Image (cartoon, rainbow, N blue to C red):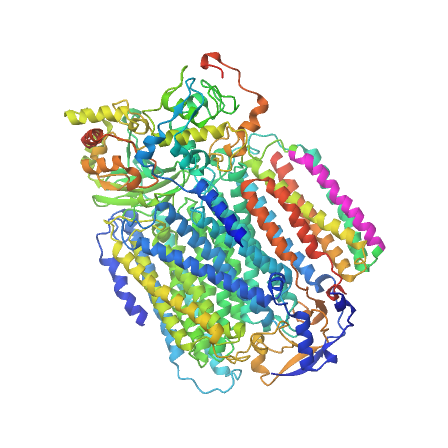
Amino acid sequence: MKERVVVDLSRLPLHGLGSASVTWWGTLAFMLIEGTGFALVIAIYFYLMSLAPIWPINARPPNLFPGTLVTLILVVSVIPNYFVSRWAEQQDLRKVRIGMVVMSLLGIAPLIVRAFEFSALNVSWDTNAYGSIVWIMLGLHTTHIMTDLADTLVLAVLVFTRHGRNLRRFGDVQDNAMYWNFVVVTWLPIYGCIYWVSRL
Amino acid sequence: MSENVARSDTRDTELGRPLVGAALEDTWATPSGFWGALSTVDHKIIGRRYILTAFVFLAMGGVLAMLIRLQLARPEARLLSPDRYNQIFTMHGANMMFLFAVPVMEAMAVYLVPLMVGTRNIAFPRLNAFSYWIYLAGGLLLWIAFALDMGPDVGWFAYVPLSGPQYAAGKRADIWAQMITFTELSALAVAVELVVTIFKQRAPGMTLDRIPLFVWSMLVTAFLVIMAMPAIMVASTSLILDRLVGTHFFNPAEGGDVLLWQHLFWFFGHPEVYIIFLPAVGMVSTLISTFARRPVFGYLALVMALIATGILSFGLWVHHMFVTGLPRLGESFFTASSMAIGIPAGVQIFCWIATLWDGKPVYKTPLLFIIGFIVTFVIGGLTGVMVASVPFDTQVHDTYFVVAHFHYVLVGGAVFPLIGAIYYWFPKITGRMMSERIGRWVFWLIFIGFNLTFFPMHILGLQGMPRRIYTYQPDMPWSGLNLFASASAVILAAGFLLFFVDAFRSARYGPPSGPNPWDAPTLEWATSSPPPSYNFARIPVVFGASPLWEQNETLAVADGLRVDRRELVVTSLVAAKPQAREASPRNSIWPLLAAISTSVMLIWSIFSPWAVVWGSIPIAIALIGWFWPKGVPEDEA
Amino acid sequence: MRLFVLFLCIVMLGGCEREERQLRLDPPVANVLDQIKLMPNGIGGTPPEVYFALGRPYETNAYNLSEGKRLYSWFGCSACHADGQGGIGPSFLDGWWYYGPEMVSIFASIRDGRPHGMPAFRDKMTTDQIWQLAGYIQTLGAYSAKTAAPSRNDDLQAHPAENRAPAAILFDQGPTPVHPEQGPTP
Amino acid sequence: MTLLQRLAPLMMLPLCSCNGWQSALDPHGESAISLKALILLIVTVCSVVWMLVMIALILALRRSHPPRPRPLQRDPRTARRMGATVIAAVAATVAVISGLTVASFFTTRALAVAGRDDLTIKVSGLQWWWNVEYFGATPDQNFTTANEIHIPVGRTVRFQLEGDDVIHSFWVPSLAGKQDLIPGRPNELSVRAERAGVYRGQCAEFCGLQHAHMAFFVIAENESDFDKWANAQRRPAAQPTDADAVAGQQAFLSKPCAACHAIRGTKATGTSGPDLTHVGSRKYIGAGLFETTRGSLAAWIADPQTLKPGNNMPLVPLSQQDLLSISAYLASLK
């Protein structure tokens, strides 16, 4: 088949940020998948709750302190996260480097508290269905913190290497920031279920 | 690598057509040899593997089916022990659903979608490679287990408590559940790739209303996968936890619930049917328009029908649970919703018939399969309307009537179009035609064999024959029809055998096909068959829904892309306006390593929860290696 | 490649061992399996050769172990031993057993009974069943869990499931107090 | 049409086959009868729909096409006509579908209000047999049997369905639609037999190794026969008279049999197997495996694992003599 050139693409940038980047859409799609997962475990929580005569099933409601502390850390972490994303957009490498270090620390902090959160549930996963579901919820979210922390750490190292000064890195930083917001947002309903619904 | 970096930025504009081809080949080709095969990220090579593997699983599942028919041919047959039989029908179901039907549809998309939207590779090619390896590992896990007498024996929907810790001894049920994790992982990965490819990598000018219908159907399917499959992953994970660490999700004595499993499973399980069927809808729409020599009638209506089916499919899982004693009122609602999904199906059927009526049908093998599809699928759809009725279902649920119904829907509704599609796209994939003469034999054998095998099962069901029984007693009035079905199954098997023979023979000795043997309108036919590693020397530009019919002499293309690095066009979501010359990753071994470490972790975790902790370390390493920039031109931005 | 095949064969043996379901024990074999040699003190001993020839099926085979668990409740073992914590009869979870943890002595205890109240099940169960039950009871007190051991029941949670090394988990409670009237201390 | 012609005889087949003592198309129970009506209605409507679609398809393929050189060349008039036709067809689909929905809804209502229940029978599904409990006026009037359910004709019987191990499904096609027995979720099913007769039922939800051999019988008989049967069942087992049976009883009680089976009036009080108090009076043994004869009893006891592999009755080594006398004893338990 003969060809007839009608468009010249040579002027286009080599990489787009935001909705012009495929990784941005990929991250979005994975967030949709995991969001469905979170929605499902929450649905299971309420399903089991609707079946149980008393809720929580022979267990004291979880102690509020560790969970609330985690929630505070996560909510606060959104602010630097927002700035990192902004700096990445402005492609300000120096600020991004600082921001990534901060975000790494803010990723480790909740994990440390989370370790105490499991014991604060006052129930074991194999005590009864209530124990099982709260452990699953907490575990599922913990894995999300861990995965995003791993991602943040790798990126933090990367921005200090020669690969740092690269539009793709800034894109990655933005996607990572978006994903962290997702991790924070999904935590809020789970926090509500584990700590407050059980007190209703 | 280094000399690539050294080489200066060269554009296709600077080179003549043949030089462009050579340069692109140099950049995109997969190195020959073992290493190249393991590290390739070419969507065509991976798609071919996917399709081939899926058909191998189809053949193996078919053998199991023949064993089932052999056992049921006469009453109280002692050919298979109940233990073996239960493994066999479970394997047949799980294999056909999770290792054949879903993967093969996604595999066709992996191969075709990038070509049909006119790009050079699928989005996230390495994820694509990963998904294939994971899928392969899941299939091997299931079949090796079966060979070891460890095959799951709890039915393909593994109802608890039968599959639970108390009643399913050993690791058989865990292997089923973990196989699910493997296949869903790969399916989700492919779904993400497809969504992004279709959203962001369409050829310039391919606005939403110019997307080929097969691509539309795969877009909807991909979203179904994304929304439905998490449910089964949650379900199978909680089943494994119940069995391994003693959680109580499904233990009524400790506040769990047996029906929770059924809700979770069917919330995935019903969309699953449409995950298999919608791609077939896309194939039918594509083939019909080619062989009726007309653009398909009611493009917009068909797209709407696809979307409507996708949305409705989440609202009718309870019709699998009509005899579990849920409140009648709720059940009646699900009757309504289940019947309502017949409406979009009707729209599609009528649009296709209208297209045929308006057009000038060319009776090639693919069209025969489409006609066969309409004949059988309408029966399947109508029996679907029947089982959607609560009272009707109380008599036929879990009987051979239902077995007949879903075989009409899945084989008649999905496998017929699939085989038609293989006959249709075979020349594109291999560059050679399949035999028309044998094709007709294949069609009639499969069509007649299928209906003779499965139609009698409707009657068996109404005569009270439950499904999943390894034998039945001589004093039941079932032996006649069972023998008849078993005998007819031989015709069906012969048809498939002939199909495989034809495919293998034609792949070697078939007559060369040329780029566009059917004079089809969509972009995949604008390049040579088989397509070069870079798909299109210059990215096509489209102005309508059937580009090759509109601009049949010369193809409008875009240039200005670099040839010294893997580069493709990213376009805007709705209007498909070019946005960037995005790089596409090079071959890499890391996806394979990641897949291996993931498989090790998943299989290990059937036996010990600590696998999740220790097994994640190699996965993390593999992923870092995967994403760490290698200083190749693709990293530039 | 050869390595892979070798690996497969190993897995294959292991797999069949664990998972195959022996639904019918031939009466002659059952007869032989009944011929165990027991030490005079009724503690140690050896099973017949055929037991090893069969690959010690009652300790390694998941199906047999789960059958044993079913028999444990069907034949009312829990009346005296509860879910293994013991009661009228001694506990199994503490891993501190009057007649030791060997299959033969467990088999003998069930078949012939023991002084101080353990009844004989010779006339209530078949040899096959007694071996299955013995295998299960051994997992109850196991120091480390077998992957083939049964998991929890769809039932009220009395103790951690056998496949989670219950004994190992519960040892910190120490052995249950010794009741001399329950028989000789080993 | 060829397909239809080929299928037509098959279509007819079930309607004329009346040996279906386990068939939804041979109903003898109130709900089964109304269900058959619904089934016939829906099947007829759907067959008509299918034929219409096929006619449309054939017309579309047979149409003599006006020559149109280029695929994209459109003819607005045909397009409009096709549009109208498709819309009409879709409208028809909507009408049919809503019609069927309404029909099924009313049948559901009819099933839901199945009249006043005055006899309650508790059925528990176990791997792989059915335990049946009858409740009398006073607790001592209660009795237990297995795999055979007698009900009076013309009276609505309420079945309490309980799954004791895994999920089973209670299904007597000739009397009513099926209902699952789910652990932790008791269900109920009302049944009314319109004609006397023996109706076979079978577990319809896959429940493990012997799902295929988990049948039971519902025997509908007139009020007086039913009462006679019930009174007979309430009585403890008859003491054996002839020497053979006496020996059989001894053997039964001294062998493992008594550990799992109960025979009221003897020391046999096992509960993990079916109650054998009146096993001799039942039509079948082994959950519909064989008709009850001394021979079949002997065969069953001799080697249950060959006849019904995987069921929970062990192969008990017995001497020839024991085997004969035990079977004689059980056969005598009328």
The answer, for residue B71, to whether it is visible in the render is yes
Looking at the picture, tell me which residue is in the foreground, B357 or B522: B522
Snapshot quadrant of residue D323: top left
Q: Tell whether position B162 is magenta.
A: no
Q: Residue at x 48, y 79 (%)?
A: B511
- Position in image of residue B21 (x %, y %): 66, 77
Side of D98 where A2 appears, left or right: right
The dominant secondary structure in magenta is: helix
For this orientation, the residue located farthest to the left is D242
Side of C127 where B518 appears, left or right: right
Q: Quadrant of the N terminus of chain B?
A: bottom right
Name above or below for residue D301 compared with residue B347.
above
For this orientation, the residue located farthest to the right is A94
- Position in image of residue A122 (x %, y %): 62, 31
Name above or below for residue B289 compared with residue B106.
below
Snapshot quadrant of residue A28: bottom right
- Position in image of residue C173 (x %, y %): 58, 22
- Position in image of residue D182 (x %, y %): 41, 40
Q: Quadrant of the C terminus of chain B?
A: bottom right
Looking at the picture, tell me which residue is in the foreground, C50 or B412: C50
- Bounds of the magenta span? A94-118
Q: Residue at x 39, y 81 (%)?
A: D63
Name above or below for residue C180 compared with residue B216.
above
The answer, for residue B307, to whether it is visible in the render is no
Q: Residue at x 57, y 24 (%)?
A: C171
